[in-house]
Every structure is written in C-alpha cells, then in structure tokens.
Amino acid sequence: MHRDSLSTEAPRRLPSLTGLRFIAAALVFATHVVWNTSLAAGPFGDGVRRLFSLSGAYGVGFFFILSGFVLTWTARRGDTAGRFWRRRFVKIYPSHLVTFLLAGVLLVAIAQPIATVDWVASLLLVQAWFPDIGTSSAMNGPSWSLSCEFFFYLMFPLFFAAVRRLRATWLWWAVGVTVALIAGAFLVAQFLVTDQPRLTIFFLSGTYSFTQIWFVYFLPPVRALEFVLGMLLARIVLAGRWPAFGVLPAAAVAVAGYLVALVAPYLAGTGGLASIWTAPLIAAAAVSDWRGTATGLRGRVLVRLGELSFAFYLVHWIVIMTAARLLGPQRAFPQPVGYALIAVLLAVSLLLAWVLHTVVEDPVVRRFSRPRTEERAPERAVPAGSGRPDDRALAFTGTQAADDEPHHGRPAAE
C-alpha cells in the first residue's frame, strides 16, 4: 500500500474497529459463561468449553493492541499529558467504580470473605501487579485488565515520545523487536519463573504455577508490549507502509492464530504471543475504513454493540457469576435449555451494559472529559507530518483519544 492509495487526511472515525470491539468482548463472555456455569453440558459442551477455553484471553490481547493503535491514531497537537490522563480516568474509572461496588454488594450478600488487600487493590486498579490468584482477579474479575490499561495510559506520553521519533523506515524493524520481546516474555515465564506451587484448577491442573501465568498474562509491563505493538501499527498505517493485506486475509490469520493457540503451550496461547495474530486485522480494518472499502464490520447494530462493549465487559462477569450461584454449579440442563439460558445471560448483560453506558459512562465523559473553560477540539484528527515525505508522523504533547466520546461512534480501546 502506498500513500497515494489513501486520502490525504486520516479519518477520525474507524467504525470497523468499533464493530470488532464487540466481537472481542463476546469472546471474553464465551469463555466465562462456559467455564463458570454448567450450561454447556455433555460431550458437546466439553467440546464447546475446549473451543472457547482461550477466547477470553484472545479478546483481551486484542483490546490491548487496539488500545495502543487507537490512542496513537488519534494523537494530535496542542494536547497535554495532564488532559490526556484526565480523559482516560473519566472514561474508565467511574464505570469501574460502579461495577466494583455492585460486585462488593453481591459478595457481602453471599458472605464471601474478601481480604482487605483485595478490596483496596481492586478499588485502586492495581490488582494485576499482585502475583496472587485471589488478589489479581478479586471483586469484578475482568477489571484486572483495567489495571494494565491504567499503566499503559500512565506511560503513554513516554511511549509515544519514543515511537514518534522512529523514522518510517525503522517501523517494521521496531515491530520485529517488539514481537521478539513478547516471545522472550513467554520464554522467561516458561523456563525461568518458578513453576511451584502448581495450580490444580481446570485444564491447567499440575502444569503451571500461578506465578508463571501472572508473569505472561497479568503483569502490566509485559502486557504493555502489546500496547506498544498497536502504537507501531498505527504509525505504519499512517505512514502508508501497511502492505496490500485486506480484512478477509487478516481475519483468516486471526482465526488461524487462535487455532494455533489452542494447541500451543498454555503460556504461549494465553498471552501476548497469541495476541500478535490479531494485529493484522486491526491494521487492515483501519486501512479499509480510510479507503472506504467494505469490511462487513460497519453495520449499525454491530457498531452500536461495539460502543457498549466496555460496559458489557464490566458487567458480564457479575451476571454470569450471579447466575452460576443461583443455578448451582452442578445442575444439569438439557442442551437446548442450557444454550437458551446462555442467550438469556448475554441479553441481560447487554441490557445492563446499555444502562451503565447510558447512565454513567457516556454522560460522565461528556461532562468531565474536558474543563468547562476548554473549547471542544475539532472533530477531525489531522496527524502532523514530520517533514519526511514518506511519513505521516504524529506531533505529540498528549493525545485526543477517539474513545473519549463514544457517542460519536468512534472506536474505543478499553
């Protein structure tokens, strides 16, 4: 792909990525619902659980790469790190606080003991830093990934300063180095991190220690490599250096990568080494939106679901775990009933996501993402050229993130 195959101005709206967000969130839902309830029963259910055993991890890795891509794509002049951090806090934390409190009420109602460190770590979104299986997934389990995202946001001005200084001719080399570091993190977890005591849960029984899994899956600096990979991809696309590789081939790569992850060692299939298979799909979808070519991901319903995906991600675990307790861990259902109940849990999660998005996320972002005295920025983000003819490098003193205002249909990066 060459720059002359694209318009001279990068679009701010990337609806195909918004649509992909919901698909990734649905993959997370699938893992949690089939592994934490008895609704997928029998031999067929065993196959379903195996098929979706890593889909949640795959979806989370996709979000980490997407986050770096979107924030770099929409970076603009005249911003500051302080304003950027304000917007990210306003976008993420209020919805987290609401679901944290809801999870707390439910846990107290069932008299489940929660250590003080778990309450505090989850409230402050630092739980992913603790190599403890209880603390890292305490309260509203999926919120551990927000702990990583907060670290990404904190470091973004420094990351961006480094990525921006790369010449366009070095970008693919930088991608290679980043992928090598991701592979190195897997090797460290596999061979250097202690494998004792070994876990005795699910299909991991006797295979790995939680410390190994924590290192490659939870630890924010390790997961930040995927975020940086997304940043580099955004620069590659903006520099006109993404090859002629469309959405369909990229989607095939993502599906093939997931199938490889299912048969690879668990530490390779659950962390960043698996996530890199989704990277081409993000870049190809962005190019297609820029060029205006069809992707099948820009439908009104799918984009709207994508806008709800962050709220959906936060509420679905609470819905599933509440249902699991009400239905009982061993209660068997006929297959049609079991899958119908899964559909009901999906619908309830979407309804609560709409409420959370409408009542909390969207109005808080509208009201508090900028000081009242600050004029609204123009709708279009125009990356500033670096002076080199082959590079649409970004001028940065902060960022204006596309997901700060989800009501405009722009992609978010939770």
Image (spheres, rainbow, N blue to C red):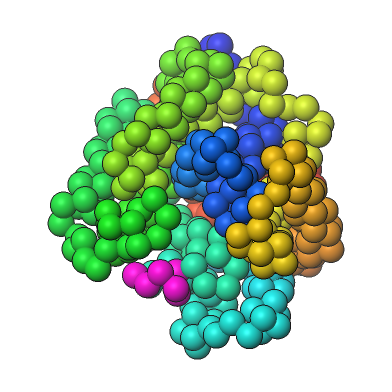
329 up-or-down from 296: above or below: below
Identify the image quadrant of residue 14.
Answer: top right
Left/right of residue 183 with respect to residue 307 in the rendered view = left
| Front residue of this view, candidates 67 and 202 | 202
**Measuring 21% from the left and 61% from the top, which residue is drawn there?**
195
The quadrant in which residue 294 appears is top right
Q: Residue at x 48, y 44 (%)?
A: 53
| x then y, percent, for residue 387 | 43, 30
| Count of numbered circles on the image | 0
Rendered residue at 42%/55% (across/down): 202
To which quarter of the image does residue 221 belong? bottom left
Residue with the most extreme bottom position:
116
Task: Please report the bounds of the magenta region as a residue range.
Answer: 131-136
Query: x%, y% of residue 277?
Result: 42, 31
Image side of residue 154 versus residue 402, left or right = left
Residue 399 image position (x, y, % from top left): 56, 51
Seen in the picture, residue 157 relative to 123 is either above or below; the reply is above
Q: Which SS type dominates the magenta stretch?
A: helix
Q: Position of residue 335 (x, y in %)?
A: 69, 40
Is residue 237 found left or right of 44 in the rendered image?
A: left
Viewer-proximal residue among 55 and 199? 199
The magenta stretch spans residue 371: no
